[in-house]
Image: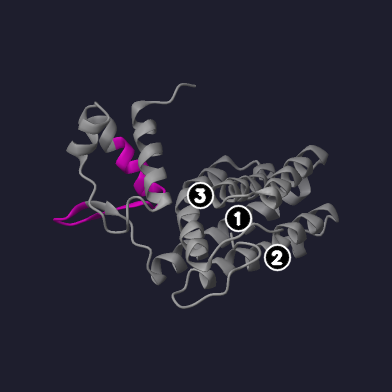
Amino acid sequence: MAETTAERIARVLGDRIVSGELAPGTPVRQDRIAEEFEASHVPAREAFQMLKAQGLLVSEPRRGMRVAPLDAATVQEMTEIRASLEVLALKYAVSKLNAAALERIERALIAGDEARTMAEWERANRAFHRELAAPCRMPRLIAMIEDLQLANARIILSANRSAGWRPGSNLAHRQIFEALKARDGVRAATLLDQHIRVLERAAAPGPKAAPAAPAG
């Protein structure tokens, strides 16, 4: 299906926010965006609503749309929501896992291990978590998780930029995958919850040692 104008605007602005090109608190004006993309105000407004749903934009009284903050409270909220939803999806997915689903999860895991840039690793990380949830066959739950993905990517990239990211094997992903192969859903869910919550600590202010494997 062809990308709509609103989806294109949301994608481009989302990439700018996730990459840090648009900093937290930056005002985003509908008229300027419509002009930049040579579109009417209608798709620009729709794009803004998409980005709000993804946690990338916030609307403030008398101040209009701004890039969402990345303070400790925001990171904690996003982490709590993501952990709850992804663990719930995994619990329903475990009984439906087949060889093809496990293969897709492993491919995403290997792509993360082989990543040579932060951007490559983040794409692989997103794919890994997407494939964990996919077998649950609960479209509304999956849609909610996907809406969080860009906001989560923004937190991950910010945390790992400040921590001095470098390529390395992602032990947490490997442990989750091995638990799923063993059909140990309880352990896999526990490991996933712990793995996601590491992100909150990684994003906390203060000095950090460079991690061999990024949080995410």
Which callout, 2 or 1, points to the residue nearer the camera? 2
Residue extending furthest right?
Answer: 182
Residue type at tag 1: Glu
* Local crowd size for mark 1, using a 10 Å CA cut-off: few (<14), some (14–19), many (≥20): many
Residue 59 is inside the magenta segment = yes
Between 51 and 93, the residue placed more toward the observer is: 51
**Which of the numbered marks, if any, corresponds to residue 86?**
1
Left or right: residue 85 compared with residue 98: left
| Residue occupying image coordinates x 57% and y 74% | 209
Q: Is the Cβ of the residue at disc 2 closer than 8 Å to that at disc 1?
A: no
Residue on which disc 2 sits: 191
Residues drawn in magenta: 46-64
Residue on which disc 3 sits: 149
| Residue occupying image coordinates x 20% and y 31% | 35
Count of marks overlaid on the render: 3
Pointer 1 or 3: first along the chain: 1
SS for dot 1: helix
Give the x, y percent position of residue 166: 61, 60
Residue 44 is inside the magenta segment = no
